[in-house]
Image (cartoon, grey):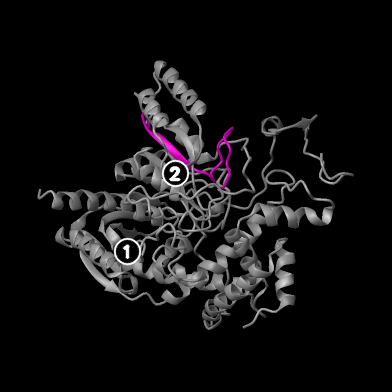
Amino acid sequence: MIENKLNEFFNKKDEWNAFITICKDDAYAQAGKIEKKKLSGKEFPLEGMIAGVKDNICTKGVRTTCGSRMLENFVSPYDATAVKRLKESGAVIVGKTNMDEFAMGSTGRNSFFSQAKNPLNTNKTPGGSSGGSAAAVASGLVDIALGTDTGGSVRQPAAICGIVGFKPTYGRISRYGLIAYASSFDTIGIMAKTTEQIKSVYKCISGFDPKDSTSSKHPAKQKVFDTKALKIGIDKKLMEESESEIRQAVEKGIGVFEKSGAECEYFDFAYSELLIPVYFVTAYSQAASNLSRFDGLRYGFYDESIKNSEEVYIKNRTAGFGKEVKRRILAGNYFLTQGNPVSIYEKAQKCRKLIFSEYKKLFEKYDIIISPTYLGKTEDLNDNGAGNKFFSKNKYEKSLMPANICGFPAVSVPCGMGCDNMPAGLHMMSEKFTDEFLLDAADFYLKNKNAEKEGI
Amino acid sequence: MDIDDKTMDYIKKLSKIDVSEEEQGEMVDYFDEAQKYLNKLKEVHIDEMSLLADISDDIFREDAPEDFDNKEALLREAHEKYGKYFSIPTVFDGDMKS
């Protein structure tokens, strides 16, 4: 069965630039190994599944580019823990998916390789930075894909491509082998068309990993999903700030829970204005530090015209990184030099604590917090930001940031059509270590939404 | 707030990145916009708050030293080795190439 599936995959054309690298030989070799082990009685929970892996997650023997010229020819000598566990569970990896360079971007435009396209409308972006993973799943090329979520990079493209995107609690899926952007936000996430697929992959790849110092041993909170006892909080400001078509789609989604007996109420989030600055100061400062390792000396892009040691770092980094990455590194170093006597980075971390405390209080009242996933229109391939400059463009991503700032699990599920006949996403977030509960809620929503549509 | 040339040069030096004149102009606009957001942080009076946030206290493992006694396994991951050491390309020699 898997061989037929692989034949089908390798015969299809990737019209959406969803992949940077296709690994045909490795995929067949992996499938062969699984078949051999099955003969001796071994069972594989993800048997028959073909997967794409975002190109910032290391895969042994297959290049891992991060969507960058800097790592164009970098071949990792080891598998990331998530990849290792995916393989051990029987999923076959068919390729590395396209992405914004070093996961910096939300349209796919910042890839060094090519712009990924949205399978639902090829004139639209697939979102980002895991746009290739979303396009690979939405187009049906793969069953599931791994993405990474630093500020919504799994959930936003999932919403835009009409699939499910799940970001687990920080510390739940090992970051070992994930090339870091902002270490305290980075999370490996899962994308698929159904919540069942996400649940089974999550079960296989999550769990403590001694190779990741931020991997958690905390047990999952045993919370039973029951719609009649469910309390849902809806972020009023985020609803108001979203495009009207998206808001209406999300309101319908909330209606599905209400009809099933859940108690829903709107709330005002006190620190809404702090989300963007806390996010950017933290993410860019950590990026400036994490990306300082890329100098072309030990691996990565090396400018052959370099004449002396003074030029090594500057020339390699200036030519190896794309515009947006350079901008964020410069901004990160700028932020790190700001503030006297208290540094702006320290201030951002204190404000992060404030945001977390406020959400902690909200989760004493609500089991789930709902908002639209992405508040704005899906961008056209060529509109380059629809007139929004720099940071203001990210006002549409405000609902995505709290899960990264606070480490909460969050999921985006398709909830009908938003603007320009493109899908809208319903965003759900719950308290830390209630990942399974959250996925049960997503599962409930999708089943009941579909039942409603089919008149069941 | 205007970012002067001196600040810009310092940031470029820290970042080990060069930018063209056009990009530098764009970066100044970028920092100007960033400043509006930074001001929002500055307006919050929480200087007395401790920095250690309970946000991650259930994440970090104990900071205890551990013995590592599997050098062979570690060396198996090396691209090249020399005896019991990793071998890496020469960084700075006469012609800058290994």
Residue found at x 50% / y 44%? A208
Q: Quadrant of the N terminus of chain B?
A: bottom right
Q: Residues within 10 Å of mark 1 (few under 14, many from 20)?
A: many
Q: Give the amino acid at mark 2.
A: Ala
Q: Secondary structure at mark 2?
A: loop
Residue A90 in sight: no
> Residue A160: where, in percent of width, then height?
35, 55
**Magenta segment boundaries in residue numbering:** A46-66
Q: Are marks 2 and 1 on the same chain?
A: yes
Vertical relation: B37 (above or below) A446: below
Q: Which mark is residue A18?
A: 2
> Residue A447: where, in percent of width, then height?
21, 48
Q: Secondary structure at mark 1?
A: strand
Residue found at x 45% / y 44%? A17
Residue situated furthest left in the rendering: A455
Tell me, yes or no, whether the highlighted magenta stretch contains residue A48: yes
